[in-house]
């Protein structure tokens, strides 16, 4: 017999030498190999788990495949006129198809209007006048942007070209009537407003250059707006927070002063009031949102001495 020496797997323990028989004997497996895992399927599930059956492809019928349709109906009691509008998305949502019909309460033939509106093109067809208004936009080379409109019945249209001024946020737009009737209109657009110059024809037949513009600026936690049009300027200041709005307005050169006051009484109730100092006319409107789908308004105007109410 001879002592058997091997590499210890665990810390040695003080024992007497181990003596074994001289007949060779296979060393016992210290770590037995685990049983082989069950075969795997392609989806990673074992073979003893029943695969989830794949549902057959649904067969979409005509009603299931149609896009959602929105229907709106209005009635004007003063003009005794009904107006219905039906619209839906077509071409996988790329365009909107709209049908609008007007007819009187006393009867008569309806006057339908069909419109197809997309992101870069729209066509509105009026069957009563047998005319259509076409509009389209396109991006040209570089920063040039082209927009055009044409009225088939009147035979007139308008073409406008817009471009950026380098890397600045300012833009210049040149627009002209088709067929042209004088000089094109030039508009300079900047982040706080725009200024346009166009040719204007007076009653005497003389043509002059007319300048119009609008400028906005933040002042004292509000927005001040100055609008200049046909030698008249309107200066308006608007202060608004979560519950209150205050809007004074001054018109020059007539020095007409007015102010509007709006107050959010509750999350569903709102009151607004407007007063004109030059005429002492005033108006008041109360609005309430009764539910998610129902709201109503009621108001009174002193200039016409008329009260009104509306429900949506």
Image (cartoon, rainbow, N blue to C red):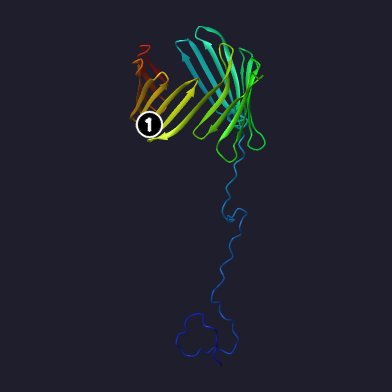
- Quadrant position of residue 120: top right
* 98 left or right of 305 in image: right
- Quadrant position of residue 63: top right
Q: Please give the residue where the numbered disc 1 appears in the rendered image.
A: 239
Residue nearest the viewer, comparing 192 with 233? 233
Which residue occupies 37% across, 21% down?
A: 257
Which residue occupies 57% across, 26% down?
A: 88
Residue nearest the viewer, comparing 77 with 264? 264
Residue 303 placement (x, y as % from top left)? 37, 13
Residue 158 vs 162, above or below: the answer is above
Is residue 150 in view? no
Residue 208 placement (x, y as % from top left)? 57, 19
Quarter of the image where the N terminus is located? bottom right
Is residue 191 in view? yes
Which residue occupies 56% across, 68% down?
A: 34
Outermost bottom residue: 1
Residue 228 placement (x, y as % from top left)? 48, 24
Q: Secondary structure at mark 1?
A: strand
Residue 250 placement (x, y as % from top left)? 40, 23
């Amino acid at each position: 017999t001879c002592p058997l020496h091997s590499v210890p797997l665990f810390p040695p323990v003080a024992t007497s030498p181990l003596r074994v028989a001289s007949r060779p004997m296979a060393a016992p497996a210290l770590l037995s190999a685990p049983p082989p895992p069950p075969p795997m399927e392609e989806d990673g599930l074992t073979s003893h788990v029943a695969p989830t059956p794949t549902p057959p492809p649904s067969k979409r019928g005509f009603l299931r495949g149609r896009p959602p349709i929105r229907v709106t109906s209005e009635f004007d009691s003063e003009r005794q006129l009904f107006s219905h509008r039906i619209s839906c998305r077509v071409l996988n949502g790329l365009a909107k198809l709209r049908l609008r019909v007007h007819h009187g309460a006393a009867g008569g033939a309806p006057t339908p209007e069909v419109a197809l509106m997309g992101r870069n093109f729209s066509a509105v067809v009026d069957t009563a006048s047998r005319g259509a208004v076409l509009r389209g936009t396109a991006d040209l080379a570089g920063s040039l942007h082209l927009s055009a409109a044409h009225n088939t019945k009147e035979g007139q249209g308008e073409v406008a070209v817009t471009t950026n001024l380098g890397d600045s946020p300012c833009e210049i737009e040149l627009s002209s009537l088709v067929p042209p009737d004088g000089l094109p209109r030039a508009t300079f657009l900047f982040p706080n407003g725009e200024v346009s110059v166009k040719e204007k024809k007076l009653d005497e037949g003389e043509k002059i250059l007319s300048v119009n513009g609008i400028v906005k600026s933040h002042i004292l936690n509000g927005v001040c707006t100055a609008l200049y049009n046909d030698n008249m300027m309107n200066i308006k200041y608007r202060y608004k927070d979560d519950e209150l709005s205050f809007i004074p307005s001054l018109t020059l050169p007539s020095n007409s002063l007015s102010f509007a006051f709006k107050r959010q009484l509750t999350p569903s109730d709102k009151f607004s009031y407007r007063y004109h100092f030059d005429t002492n006319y005033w108006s008041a409107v109360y609005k309430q949102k009764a539910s998610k789908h129902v709201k109503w308004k009621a108001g009174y105007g002193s200039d016409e001495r008329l009260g009104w109410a509306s429900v949506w």
